[in-house]
């Protein structure tokens, strides 16, 4: 029955949001990302106009995800068998989410980068630029750490599986070296994105678990930063 009172309509709407959040992992991730962005906006003290633009972008992403969920539930109600038209409807609904997320990312980048990049550059300056010898030693130590961790765990082969993802460790070590060498936030983001893509490929190929990839990334990043700081203190 269609609700007649405003409070009943409101409860139905809340139930819809709760259902989508409970059943859709992507929506939960979007809510989490929205909370992080809003906290950053509060901490960085963005202007009122910038906050409004961020809020609109976030609302649009959540709206698109809710509509996507509604389309999927409706199609599943009509048929549980595969149908090309049903696939198209679900794909188009998912495409609307992708476009809204892309727009939100562009908006968030244009607004928050002017606040975050100066802080990021100051942090990089504190760590310092790695010397050529420090860069070489960092990569060698990362490789040695990968070998030891794989040997101690007794899992995986040199290029397949194991306690730590060697590809992720080396990729993030290189990304860290490029970041510290250039001291440029844009280049840093691009190289980190490449490192994430390399790491994600290991997950897609079912060679490593997410925990092993994260452990590998932290190993590569941590060792590289520590070696860089150590060389700076000794020089």
Image (cartoon, rainbow, N blue to C red):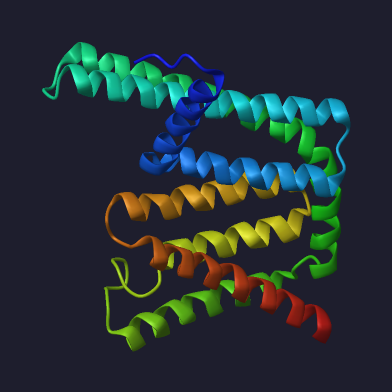
List the single residue furthest toward the top. Answer: 85
Query: Quick one: quadrant of the C terminus?
Result: bottom right
Between 118 and 30, the residue placed more toward the observer is 30
Residue 94: give x, y in percent of width and height. Answer: 39, 24
Query: Quick one: quadrant of the N terminus?
Result: top left
List the single residue furthest toward the left. Answer: 81
Q: Residue drawn 84% across and 43% down?
A: 115
Tell me the quarter of the picture where residue 3 sits.
Answer: top left
Asked if residue 235 shows in the view, the reply is no
Asked if residue 29 shows in the view, the reply is yes
Residue 199: give x, y in percent of width and height. Answer: 44, 55
Q: Residue drawn 47% across and 14% down?
A: 4
Tell me the quarter of the picture where residue 85 sits.
Answer: top left
Between 104 and 159, the residue placed more toward the observer is 104
Q: Residue drawn 44% across and 40% down?
A: 21
Q: Residue drawn 47% across and 75% down?
A: 143
Image height check: is 20 above or below 64? Answer: below
Residue 39: give x, y in percent of width and height. Answer: 74, 47
């Amino acid at each position: 029955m269609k609700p007649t009172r405003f409070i009943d309509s409101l409860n139905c709407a809340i139930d819809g949001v709760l259902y989508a959040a409970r059943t859709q992992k992507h929506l939960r991730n979007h809510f989490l990302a929205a909370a992080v962005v809003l906290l950053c906006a509060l901490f960085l003290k963005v202007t009122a106009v910038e906050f409004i633009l961020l809020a609109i972008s976030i609302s649009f992403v959540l709206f698109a995800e809710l509509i996507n969920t509604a389309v999927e539930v409706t199609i599943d109600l009509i048929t549980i068998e595969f149908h090309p038209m049903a696939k198209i409807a679900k794909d188009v609904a998912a495409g609307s989410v992708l476009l809204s997320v892309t727009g939100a990312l562009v908006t968030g980048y244009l607004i928050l980068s002017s606040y975050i990049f100066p802080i990021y550059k100051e942090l990089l300056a504190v760590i310092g630029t790695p010397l050529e010898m420090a860069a070489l030693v960092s990569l060698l130590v990362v490789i040695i750490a990968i070998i030891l961790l794989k040997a101690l765990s007794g899992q995986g082969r040199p290029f397949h599986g194991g306690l730590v993802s060697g590809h992720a460790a080396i990729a993030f070590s290189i990304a860290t070296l490029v970041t510290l060498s250039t001291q440029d936030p844009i280049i840093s983001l691009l190289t980190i994105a490449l490192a994430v893509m390399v790491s994600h490929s290991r997950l897609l190929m079912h060679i490593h678990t997410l925990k092993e990839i994260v452990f590998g990334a932290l190993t590569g990043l941590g060792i590289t930063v520590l070696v860089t700081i150590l060389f700076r203190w000794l020089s």
